[in-house]
Amino acid sequence: MELVQQLFNGLVSGSFYALLALGLSVIFGMLGVVNFAHGAFYMLGAVGAFVLLDTLGMSWWLALIVVPVVLGVFGMALERLFVARLVRLDPLYNFLLTFGIALILQDVVRLRYGVASQPYPRPALLDGSMSLGLFDYPKYQVFVFVFSIVLSVLVWLVLTRTRVGMIVRAATERPELTRSLGIDVRRWVTPVFGFGIALAGLAGVLAAPMRAVNSGMGGDLVIVIFAVVVIGGLGSVFGSVAAGYLVGMLSAVGTLYVPAFSQSLVFVLMALVLLLRPAGLFGREEGVRT
Amino acid sequence: MIISRLVAGRSPIARIGLLVVGLVVAFGLPWFLYPPVALDVAAWALFAVALDLLLGYTGLLSFGHAAFWGTSAYATGVVAIETGLPFYVAVLAGALVAALVALPVAMLSVRRTGIYFAMVTLAFAQLIYFVANQWRSMTGGENGLQGIPRDAFGMDLADSFYFYYAAIPLILLGLFCAWRVVHSPFGRVMVAIRENPARARALGYPVDRYKVQVFVISAFLAGIAGGVYAVGHGFASLQEVYWTTSGKVVVMNILGGMGTLWGPVLGAGIIVVLEDYLATAGIDAIGVVTGAIFVVTVLVFRRGIWGTARRLLRGRDRTAGTAAPTVEEEREGARTTVHGGG
């Protein structure tokens, strides 16, 4: 009973991991860039929702649309201005660039809003709890889980069933070949980067009513996301999402049995994956990519 | 002219000149800087050079080196507090513990390369951070480990000025080790692995074993630096194992110029002095400043200060044959096509 409840908690926190890992993976697939600023954009999503509520009184539902769009545009501008300049070099340079951007974004928010957490109320429609048969569970958490699943499936459908998705997948897996077939891969790079950032911002807005909203909320999280995508196989969209939920459940169950080390379990799992299946649970050997 | 010869560092005389300048700076530093700051510069310089062995010479970006600096800071502190041995022994013991921790981390991390290596080392460092946070009986948790003594053979080291001179031999020894490693047959293999791992493997070098060895040596040297830092400050805190510390030592390398040994030393000096200046001036925006240095250096200045200076100066007198290409040229050339999709 308690275990089932913890598993459900795990699915909810896994929803955030999944959305963030999904964006990180899509960006990596398309650009070969590991975006260190992903956690910072998650933080900006949550802080952005707070600022819009605080200054304009914008409702959470509206913020759920406005914030990701704004951050997505911001992300596209970053890609054009900075990331694109380094994309032809060793991917480590973009890793370092986005690390620098993450430090700046995080510090700017800290300077403006301090380190204390800002309160964000749950939307009225999702307040209270509902019965899940075995136990009562907060409505909002149920919504987060369902929403992230729907979103992941949607992204999956776009990638597998549409022409845009076909191009993105082809460009991800065989960039040279795709171009030689006369497809302008470059056209899709900036939108895909913006889309990944928008997903991170969306996760942030989702997190605002249930997590502490502060400048540091993305800093540690992005490292967990790195472990998640190493476990799932970076560049594998399905692997990232699956590993996200898996890690969420693992940590939640860990709080029952080894509370002191529940945060460390994800890294232990990563070590095991590296030992037994270095390419990740759902990944291909990295040699194939290049 | 003299300076240009020194930085270009091609002739033996220039090399010796550079060494003399370096030693003069090392021994004169507490006269120019507030002694605790001078000690920070020395400790971070060794830390940055330790990372350079991996990043600049072997082509492996460890984004989790705080793990070894911090592990040694704690281990040094525990040894010094519990045994009361001279701090030299405590620091060496701490560095040894760091090297022992580094061994399994290295063996797992070298299973991935490139960007994955950076992510994996970062994740392992975070694991060590969580362990340090939870193991309160050993590390003091969020309070840190306090009251690390500065004892050595009954010398009075309470004054940071004197402690600097007691500690600098350890730092210089560490720097000498790094220099020896780079200028040895082993060091040539490191560079070969950086330039072309497949060819190094084809020539019969066990590439992964070399990587693990460099990693452990690097962690040991980072451990010496972390131990000296902990003794100098009298405490070790969670900050020492946090990812921002890993990022700070990377920015020192990038800013100074990776793969040059002198560059990371310079980078460490600049960053430590800059941080001290900002703190004294009451400007509380170290993240913005460090982040901006990252962004600007990576975008327009990828060779770093030392690398750029050396390139400019060597470019001026091309008479003595073709200069060896730097890390940067080789890497850019070799990998331009990797992500051609962008």
Image: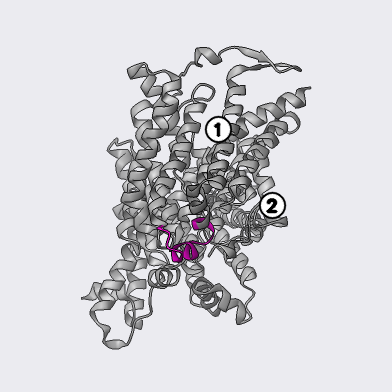
- Kind of residue at disc 2: Val
* Viewer-nearest residue: B178 or A246: A246
- Which amino acid is tagged 1? Asn
Relative image position of residue A250 (x, y in whole percent): 70, 37
Q: Quadrant of the N terminus of chain B?
A: bottom left
Residue A119 placement (x, y as % from top left): 46, 18
B244 or A13: nearer the viewer: A13
Q: In which image quadrant can residue A186 be found?
A: bottom left
Residue occupied by mark 2 = A273
Q: Which residues are magenta?
A: A171-184
Q: Residue B129's x, y, as percent?
A: 58, 42
Q: What secondary structure is found at the residue carrying circle 1?
A: helix
Q: Residues within 10 Å of mark 1 (few under 14, many from 20)?
A: few
Q: Which residue is the site of mark 1?
A: B143
Considering only vertical position in the picture, is B72 above or below B61? above
Residue B80 in view, yes or no: no
Element class at badge 2: helix
Residue B171 versus residue A19 in the image, above or below:
below
Camera-near label (2 vs 1) is: 2
Residue A162 within the magenta-colored segment of the rendering: no
Q: Of all residues shown, which one is farthest toward the right?
A: A1
